[in-house]
Image (spheres, grey):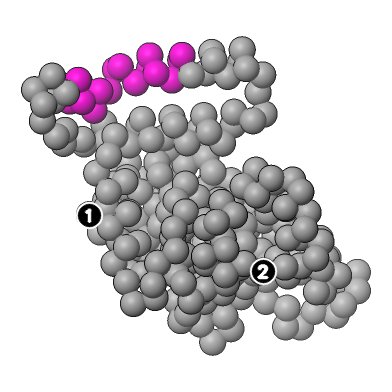
Amino acid sequence: MTDSPHVTVEITDQIGQVTMDRPEKHNAMTPEMAESIATALADLSADDDVRCLVLTGSGGTFNTGADLAGLEGDERDEAVIDSVADPLHASVRTMTSAPKPVVTGINGIVAGGGLGLALASDIAIMSEEARIQYAYPSIGLSGDGGITWLLPRLLGLRRAQRFALLNEGFDAIEAVDAGLVTEAVPGDSFDDRLAEVAAELASGPTKAFGTIRQLLFEGANRSLDDHLRHERDGVTGLTETDDYATGVGTFFEDEEPTFTGH
């Protein structure tokens, strides 16, 4: 897997990390950059040797959405916006459906379309120096990147309405208290904590994690009876995995399991 302009990819110890790297533009996405993010996430999601995905930014910024430079401010911008939104949506779909855990490292400001990328994870680690802003109403737009689907699920409808319509922001502590992100970390220990969480997830029962995240993401859209059937199929299907055999064997021996992801 090769890096693309403004997007770097690194695989280390079964952790696949995608870093958005356009700091001079606050990691704002051009169509090409949005495509590169989507391709990198899809490739890592499909790689059986990768057991955890990480998405973060460089230069003190996570992602500020689409690059607004060159927009005309009228209907001529429809094609330009679509050219960023389509791969952005593909990235969010990959992040929410990947068969392995996904972690976002919110290292700095996140706004607009970047918000969907920041929140479409299982674990969101946020630097205490970062800030989250809805931003779309500032330019007369509504929202994309899955944020109007994610926000009510994370914040509850009433608070999501306030956050979006009043264009309010959250600092890291407020974001944790609201349930928007998982954990706030001092800036000087952010990289270490992000790596620690990713390593813990990468060493876990990957197939079980994949089933758990699928059930959690999709449960709200099913009836209880339908969801119970999916739970049953998931838990019984996992009895065929090596990690299940390892887990049961070490449980009765009072040992820590060493999972392989198979």
Residue receiving disc 1? 13
* Mark toward the viewer: 2 or 1: 2
Magenta span contains residue 158: no
Can residue 223 be seen in the rendering of this structure? Answer: yes
Q: Is residue 256 above or below residue 135?
A: above
Residue 226 % position (x, y): 61, 15
Residue neighbourhood size for the residue with mark 1, other residues' Cα within 10 Å, grouped as few (<14), some (14–19), many (≥20): few
- Are the residues at dot 2 and dot 1 in contact (C-beta closer than 8 Å)? no
Q: Secondary structure at mark 2?
A: strand
Q: Nearer the viewer, residue 221 or 187?
A: 187
How many angstroms separate mark 2 from mark 1 (CA)? 35 Å
Q: Residue 235: where, in percent of width, then height?
A: 39, 18
Q: Which residue is mark 2?
A: 169
User: Where residue 158 sits: x, y (%)?
Assistant: 76, 48
Q: From this view, report whether residue 55 is shown above or below residue 127.
A: above
Q: Secondary structure at mark 1?
A: loop
**Residue at the far right in the pictured view:** 74
Q: Which residues are magenta?
A: 232-249
Name the N-terminal-most of marks 2 and 1: 1
Which image quadrant for residue 203?
top left
How many numbered marks have been drawn onto this rendered protein structure?
2
Q: Which mark is residue 89?
A: none
Q: Looking at the image, which residue is at 45% across and 76% down?
A: 58
Q: Which amino acid type corresponds to the residue marked 1 in the rendered image?
A: Asp
Residue appearing at x 39%, y 52% in the figure: 53
From the viewer's perspective, is 56 left or right of 255?
Answer: right
